[in-house]
C-alpha cells in the first residue's frame, strides 16, 4: 500500500499566484514527521519544510507553508507568490519510527509568466 | 565537510561489472539513507542505517545490491553484475534528529 500519495503529476501556476500541492499519507504510528523537498532540473534535493505529528501549529518557512490536517492525514504544501524559480519537482515524504523515510511520486510544478 | 558528499559524481560501466558508490554523511549524523531515482521518476528507498542498529534492507531490489556503513560514518553501496536497468541516480542522505540532508547523487550508467 502507498504510504505517501501525491495525486497531481503536474501543476501549472502563474507567477505571483499561490499554489497548493497535495500530499496524503498513511501510518498507524502516532509519531511521525512529514517533509517537503524541491528538486530542480539540476537534480539536487532541497529541503523546504518539516511538520511533526505532534506539532500544534502548521509549519511555515518563508513563502512555504504546510497545511497539516491530521484527521484527514494530509500535508499539503502551499507556495505563496510563486516565482519562475519555483518550477521544479516537489516531493512529499514521511518518516516514521524508527527512522525510515518514504517519498511520494512527486508533482512537477511549472510557473509561467 | 558541511554537507553530504558522494563519489563518484558520474560512473559509466559495462553490463556485468561491479560498482561501488560512496557516501560521506554529515559528521555526527546517525541515520544514513540510500535511494535510487530513475529518469523522471520518484525516489525509490533502498536501505537505511541508524546508529548501531541492524540496517533496514527492505528496499534493496535484488541480492546484487548490498551496502555497508563503516564506523557509523562512511557508507558504500555495491552493485554486483550490473544490469542496464540499474542505470539511475543514486542518492544518499543523512540525518541526526529532524533534518534530512541529501548529497548530490551519483549518476550510474550501465552500457
Image (cartoon, coloured by chain):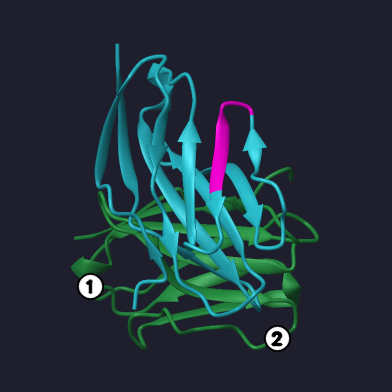
Q: Give percent across and percent down for residue B70.
A: 69, 76
Which chain is represented by cyan in the image?
A
x and y percent of residue B38 in the render? 28, 57
Q: Main secondary structure of the magenta part?
A: strand
Say which residue appears at 63% left-offset and 49% top-offset. A50
* Chain B tint as drawn: green
Q: Residue at x 53, y 59 (%)?
A: B92
Quick check: is B86 in the magenta stretch? no
In the rendered structure, the answer to whether residue B29 lies left or right of residue A26 reads right
In the image, is residue A105 above or below residue B72? above
Quarter of the N terminus of chain A within the rendering: bottom left
Same chain under badges 2 and 1? The reply is yes
- Which residue is identified by label 2? B53
A52 left or right, relative to A75? right
Circle 1: element type: loop
Q: B110 or A71: which is nearer to us?
A: A71
In the figure, is residue A70 to the left or right of A8?
A: right
Task: Decide which of A90, B31 is in the foreground and name it.
Answer: A90
Residue matched to label 1:
B83
Can you give x and y, in whole percent of width and height, for residue A104 in the image?
Answer: 39, 59
Q: Please identify the quadrant where the C terminus of chain A is shown.
A: top left
The total of numbered circles placed on residues is 2
Distance CA(mark 2)–CA(mark 1): 30 Å
Q: Which residues are magenta?
A: A62-67
Crowding at label 2, few (<14), some or many (≥20) Cα neighbours within 10 Å? few
Chain of the residue on which disc 1 is drawn: B
* Above-or-below relation of A24 to A97: above
Amino acid at each position: 500500500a502507498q504510504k505517501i500519495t501525491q495525486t497531481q503529476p503536474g501543476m501549472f501556476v502563474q507567477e505571483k499566484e499561490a499554489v497548493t500541492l497535495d500530499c496524503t499519507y498513511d501510518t498507524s504510528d502516532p509519531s511521525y514527521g512529514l517533509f517537503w523537498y524541491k528538486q530542480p532540473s539540476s537534480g539536487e534535493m532541497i529541503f523546504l519544510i518539516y511538520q511533526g505529528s505532534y506539532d500544534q501549529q502548521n509549519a511555515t518557512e518563508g513563502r512555504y507553508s504546510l497545511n497539516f490536517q491530521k484527521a484527514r492525514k494530509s500535508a499539503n504544501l502551499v507556495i505563496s507568490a510563486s516565482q519562475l524559480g519555483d518550477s521544479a519537482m516537489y516531493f512529499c515524504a514521511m518518516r516514521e519510527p524508527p527512522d525510515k523515510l518514504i517519498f511520494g511520486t512527486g508533482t512537477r510544478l511549472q510557473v509561467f509568466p | 565537510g558541511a554537507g553530504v558528499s558522494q563519489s563518484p559524481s558520474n560512473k559509466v560501466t559495462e553490463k556485468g561489472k561491479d560498482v561501488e558508490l560512496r557516501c560521506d554523511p554529515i559528521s555526527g549524523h546517525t541515520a544514513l539513507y540510500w535511494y535510487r531515482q530513475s529518469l523522471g521518476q520518484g525516489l525509490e528507498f533502498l536501505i537505511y542505517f541508524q546508529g548501531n542498529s541492524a540496517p533496514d534492507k527492505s528496499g534493496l531490489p535484488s541480492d546484487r545490491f548490498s551496502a555497508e556503513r563503516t564506523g557509523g560514518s562512511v557508507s558504500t553501496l555495491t552493485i554486483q553484475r550490473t544490469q542496464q536497468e540499474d542505470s539511475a541516480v543514486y542518492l544518499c542522505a543523512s540525518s541526526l534528529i529532524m533534518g534530512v540532508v541529501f548529497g548530490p547523487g551519483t549518476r550510474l550508467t550501465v552500457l
